[in-house]
Image (tube, rainbow, N blue to C red):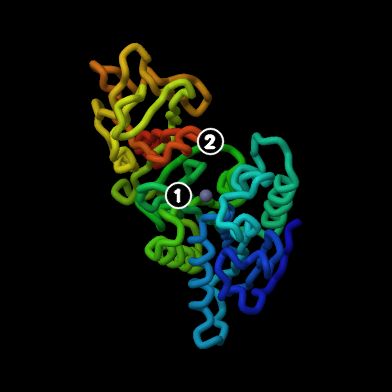
Amino acid sequence: MLTEIDYLPDGLLELEATQLEEVLGGPTLIHLSGRREPALFVSVLMHGNETTGWDAVRQLLKGYMPGGVERELPRSLSLFVGNIKAAAFGLRHLDGQPDYNRVWPGSDLAETPEHLMMTRLVETMRRRGVFASVDVHNNTGLNPLYACVNLLDNRFFHLATMFSRTVVYFIRPCGVQSMAMANICPAVTLECGKSGEAYGIERARDYLDACLHLSEHPVHPVANHDIELFHTVAIVKVPDQISFGHCVSDVDIRLADDLDHFNFRELPRGTVLGCLRPDIGLGLEVTNEHGKDVSERYLELEGNEIKLRVPVMPSMLTLDHRIVRQDCLCYLMERYDDHLKLLD
Ligand SMILES: [Zn+2]
């Protein structure tokens, strides 16, 4: 299922993400040698509709071939080009395919051939040795660029803050690339804003180039003013039986209509999320990392307004009705700076 090659097929860098399947045929691991070993591991198109990673890699590698003459990479690069079948259709994944970023070792989903592929891939990279791992993604809605880590470790923080001061630590969902690779080397996930935007592509390209030039991972603590560390602590859902909407009155919860502007903003206690019809309780359900209901810790009712009971920073808040129903209204994050001090 996984193709492994040690060269860049002719013309590959000219292809859009939608065209890769025609040439590569399936998920492909490409090893390119450079001046230093071990390799930087980069994965792109884990979600087929998130093209920024591939476009950043195209620009990066073209930069090392001025006028068609190949220059040596500062460090070897192992590039995993993931779900190009879904990319051909501009989809996250196809019906019948699992989410490629939930099937890495540590996944809690039922085993699929993709699980086996990722397990083999991790073993291959472990055997070869890896300097660092970067998985490049996009998201929807209004979010800044940020990096995620799954371990509280100074080497990981340095790698993350090379991309953004905003760093998110999470341990759910499981089975993600960065959590599996964290067992081998410092690993980050990049969230590069909306797919295909030039700014995100340039930032990812420059970041990958900086990683290729890095000689070692600093182990000293990241200075406090260079990192804003947040921890994803809870998920907020609208229960199925509760109706909701923006700018409409005939619903159980009327949500603020500019709600997605709250993403990655630290909201003070008392921030109003919406108005409730009487006698439906809190209206929203908040669950922590361990699946426990923690609604009362985060939300309170005042009159008919639902308000934050503690300061939090939401992410992934969306105005898309379907996404709210299928996934969630948002994630809640808390500042995690106190934990940094423990690592000094
Ligand atoms: Zn993604």
- Whether 207 is drawn above or below 118: the answer is below
Crowd rating for badge 1 (residues with CA inside 10 Å; few <14, some 14–19, many 20+): some
- Whether 226 is drawn above or below 57: the answer is above
The quadrant of the picture occupied by the C terminus is top left
- Whether 165 is drawn above or below 314: the answer is below
> How far separated are the C-alphas under marks 2 and 1?
17 Å
Tell me the amino acid under the disc marked 2.
Arg
Residue drawn at (65%, 46%), measured in percent from left and top?
Answer: 95
Give residue 195's quadrant in the image: bottom left
Q: Position of residue 123 (x, y in %)?
A: 71, 52
Residue drawn at (29%, 17%), measured in percent from left and top?
Answer: 301
296 lies left or right of 59 = left
Q: Which mark is residue 139?
A: 1
Indicate the secondary structure of the residue bearing disc 1: loop
Give residue 314's quadrant in the image: top left
Q: Nearer the viewer, residue 300 or 5?
A: 300
Indicate the secondary structure of the residue bearing disc 2: loop
Residue identifier under label 2: 172
Residue 181 in view = no
Crowd rating for badge 2 (residues with CA inside 10 Å; few <14, some 14–19, many 20+): some
Residue drawn at (45%, 35%), measured in percent from left and top?
Answer: 324
Q: Position of residue 306 (x, y in %)?
A: 29, 23
Q: Which mark is residue 324?
A: none
Q: Position of residue 216 (x, y in %)?
A: 50, 61
Number of marks in the rendered image:
2
Q: Disc 2 or disc 1, which is closer to the eye? A: 1
The single residue placed furthest to the top in the displayed view is 279
Of callouts 2 and 1, which one flags the residue occurring earlier in the amino acid sequence?
A: 1
